[in-house]
Amino acid sequence: MLHTFVALVQDKPGVLTRVASLFRRLNINIVSLTVGESERPDTSRMTIVCEAPDTAAHRIRASLYKLEITEDVDEVGRSEAVIRELCLIKVAAGPSPPPEHPGAQHSRSQIFELATVFRARVVDLAPESIMLEMTGAASKIEGLIQVLRESGFHILEVSRTGRMAMRRGHHTSRVLKALGTPDESTTDPNQPAYPNKPSAEDFLENQFPDVHEEEA
């Protein structure tokens, strides 16, 4: 089962390594990981997609909280969040098929038609190739790639960002408190940024004593 976690972490050197090491110690595979700036200063936003049993969600979240660099962690699902992925696809499309694939399709008009159907954009046009940009659900991106291959086109390169997720709608102060996230309208600037942040023991109840943070 795939789980999607959104984590706010301190923007410091080595953060990515520590998060990756944590999943390695838990023996859980990371399917995709995206990192970028967030709305908070000196804080990065990570969207982590991992493959793990349904019962492991609390363990993963609690283990992330045990890292002192972690400020907030939220698990989101498809029904409660907007989940998107960006993909760049470079397809061979010149006056003749590529020499290494003499039987491949190379009609640019057909590529333009497929791009229109899947709502992809042409972002680069070279003598021997066309680059498409597509944003959407992973299944939609995989559908375009599959159609291109089944239509006989030769895909030169594929670059995908992995999932990016954000909860739908506006959270009330009660929801923000439950998530351990401060309400900007009521937060005292002299108070800690995450006063309601739960500890790992709140989730684990000492059921996983072998999960420890590595010493620096």
Image: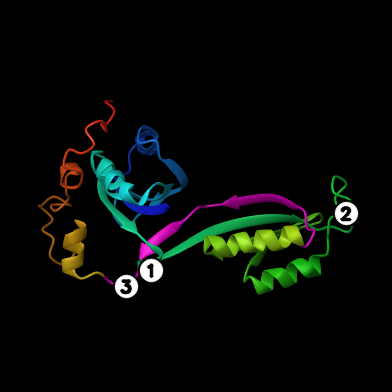
Q: CA distance from mark 1 to mark 3?
A: 12 Å
Q: 123 or 56: nearer the eye?
A: 56
Residue at screen point 68% across, 49% down: 157
Residue indicated by mark 1: 79
* Numbered label attached to residue 103: 2
* Numbered label attached to residue 169: 3
Please say if the residues under marks 2 and 1 sit with CB atoms less than 8 Å apart. Answer: no
Please say if the residues under marks 2 and 3 sit with CB atoms less than 8 Å apart. Answer: no
Residue 169 in view of the camera: yes
Dot 2 or dot 1: first in sequence order is 1
Relative image position of residue 117 (x, y in whole percent): 67, 74
The outermost residue toward the top is 216
Determine if the magenta segment contains residue 107. no
Q: Residues within 10 Å of mark 1 (few under 14, many from 20)?
A: few
Identity of the amino acid at label 1? Ser
* Numbered label attached to residue 166: none
Identity of the amino acid at label 3? Gly
Asked which colour scheme the image uses, the reply is rainbow
